[in-house]
């Protein structure tokens, strides 16, 4: 098992993530924040990031949230990528506001 | 007989990103019984207790979510009658031939105002429960997976939930059991409806996007079995959304978790019986946090906005 450094550009956070863990799982396991957490299974799109630098192994994820074009620009769901080098990512998911704004701003759900 | 018309939820067809991984997971972790595959490659499941041939159908797709949710009705005459009533209500219906879904008769398919596809059918082969109909034992011996009693209900997200309430109560004979009001005290944020005497057979939440699945729910026999389910989920590294906890709404105990494609599922127990003569329960916006999660007593952003 190898560990790599993940840098979340939006917040400047860094954490170490094993290559056996998804980038999202690695963040959660350390109690760290920065990427919004949804289903963790590639279906809901909440944890979408753009990988600015680095290599990773990718598992299947919902096309409803990452188009082929976006994929070619490095957009992925962070719950479905496993680092194979240090990574720099930018959070671009639907709940980005929740990590990039003060906590008080997140309610109500605005249905 | 008191119960006629629409009897109960019958089957749900769920989209999965990796069929083989999902078949293994629904078998080993959920503890459902694999009931075969059809020519399209769809995989069929039922719980050990369910008598009809299938209740969960998995279809491989490139995005997660729900294709359709179906209710079983009393008989063929009821199916034809409800089909006429839907058409009279201005709903376009389509007949899906018998056998298109394994061991299932003709289905009447239609779209509801929130964009979801709902089906009604009268016939599905009685494959039988694991204990049978003659001198049965109880099914309590421990086995693999969560082993729920039945596929019980679903919660769907979409825009026009008022149109859904009208269709389900006025045409299909459902009753309103509970509702949550928005800050204005008038608009429904969410509604829980039953076609039987349960706390819910289907529920809707108002949401900006149509056609979304919030969760598909499975009934457990006890609160203890819900806690046991949580242990099984951790052993299998299942992604848990929230729980074990309790709802104020319906009063059921619950865990929300995700299948391998991110479709939210629920194992729940409890709730209460609702009869059509009872006044429905109303929750105000001020108490919605306690209504949704009785112990946390606050809204949860992921619970409200993560859907497939």
Image: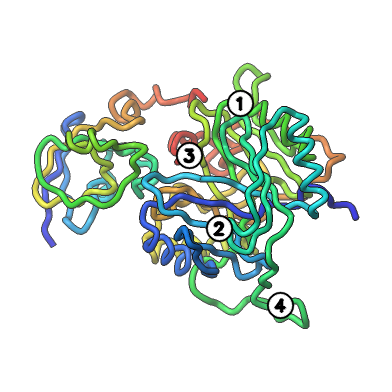
Tag 2 near tag 3, CB within 8 Å: no
Does label 4 or label 2 sit earlier along the sequence?
A: 2
- If you read the primary sequence from the N terminus, does the residue marked by circle 4 or circle 3 appear first? 4
Q: Identify the mark nearer the N-term, 2 or 1.
A: 2
Residue at the outermost front position: B97
Foreground tag (4 vs 3): 4
**Left or right position of A38 against A88:** right
Looking at the image, tell me whether mark 2 or mark 3 is earlier in sequence order. Answer: 2
Q: Nearer the viewer, residue B254 or B162?
A: B162
Crowd around label 4: few <14 · some 14–19 · many ≥20 (10 Å): few
Give the labeled residue for mark 2: B56
Disc 2/disc 3 C-alpha distance (Å): 23 Å
> Distance between the Cα atoms at labels 4 and 2?
20 Å
Q: Which residue is mark 1?
A: B160
State the residue at coordinates (59%, 40%).
B117
Q: Secondary structure under badge 3?
A: helix
Structural distance between the alpha carbons of marks 3 and 1? 20 Å
Mark 1 residue element:
loop
Residue, disc 3: B303
User: Badges 1 and 4: C-beta atoms under 8 Å apart?
Assistant: no
Who comes first in sequence, dot 3 or dot 1? Answer: 1
Between B214 and A14, the one nearer to me in the picture? B214
> Both on one chain, marks 4 and 2?
yes
Mark sitting earlier along the chain (1/4): 4
Q: Relative to residue B171, is residue A67 drawn left or right?
A: left
Q: Chain of mark 3?
A: B
Separation of disc 2 and disc 1 at Cα? 26 Å
Name the residue located 24 percent from the left edge and 32 percent from the top edge.
A91
> What is the CA distance from the residue labelled 1 to the residue labelled 4?
42 Å
Q: Is residue B288 above or below residue A22?
A: above
């Amino acid at each position: 098992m190898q560990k790599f450094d993940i840098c979340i550009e939006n917040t400047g956070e860094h954490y170490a993530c094993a290559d056996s863990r998804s980038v999202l799982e690695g963040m959660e396991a350390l109690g760290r924040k920065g990427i919004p957490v949804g289903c963790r299974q590639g279906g809901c799109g909440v944890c979408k990031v753009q990988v600015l630098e680095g290599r990773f192994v990718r598992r299947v994820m919902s096309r409803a949230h990452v188009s082929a074009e976006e994929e070619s620009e490095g957009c992925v769901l962070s719950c479905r990528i496993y680092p194979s080098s240090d990574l720099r990512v930018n959070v671009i998911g639907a709940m980005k506001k929740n990590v990039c704004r003060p906590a008080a701003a997140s309610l109500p759900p605005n249905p | 007989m008191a119960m006629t018309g629409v009897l109960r939820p019958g089957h749900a067809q769920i989209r999965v990103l990796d069929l083989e991984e999902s078949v293994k997971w629904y078998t080993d972790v959920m503890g459902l019984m694999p009931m075969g595959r059809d020519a399209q490659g769809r995989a069929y499941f039922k719980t050990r207790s369910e008598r009809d041939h299938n209740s969960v159908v998995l279809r491989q797709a490139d995005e997660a979510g729900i294709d359709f949710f179906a209710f079983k009705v009393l008989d063929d005459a009821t199916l034809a009658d409800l089909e006429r009533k839907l058409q009279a209500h201005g709903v376009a219906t389509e007949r899906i031939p018998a056998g298109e879904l394994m061991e299932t008769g003709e289905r009447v398919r239609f779209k509801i105002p929130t964009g979801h596809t709902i089906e009604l059918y009268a016939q599905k082969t009685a494959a039988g429960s694991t204990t049978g109909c003659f001198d049965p034992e109880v099914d309590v011996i421990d086995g693999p997976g969560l082993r729920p009693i039945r596929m019980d209900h679903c919660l769907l997200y979409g825009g026009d939930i008022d149109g859904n309430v009208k269709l389900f109560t006025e045409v299909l004979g459902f009753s309103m059991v509970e509702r949550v009001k928005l800050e204005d005290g008038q608009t429904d944020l969410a509604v829980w409806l039953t076609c039987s005497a349960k706390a819910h057979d289907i529920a809707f939440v108002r949401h900006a996007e149509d056609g979304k699945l919030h969760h598909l729910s499975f009934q457990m026999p006890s609160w203890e079995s819900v806690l046991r389910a949580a242990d099984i989920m951790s052993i299998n590294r299942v992604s848990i959304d929230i729980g074990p906890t309790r709802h104020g709404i319906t009063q059921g105990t619950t865990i929300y978790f995700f299948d391998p494609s991110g479709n939210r599922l629920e194992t729940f127990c409890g709730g209460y019986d609702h009869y059509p003569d009872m006044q429905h329960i109303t929750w105000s916006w001020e108490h919605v946090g306690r209504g949704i999660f009785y112990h946390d007593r606050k809204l949860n952003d992921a619970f409200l906005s993560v859907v497939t």
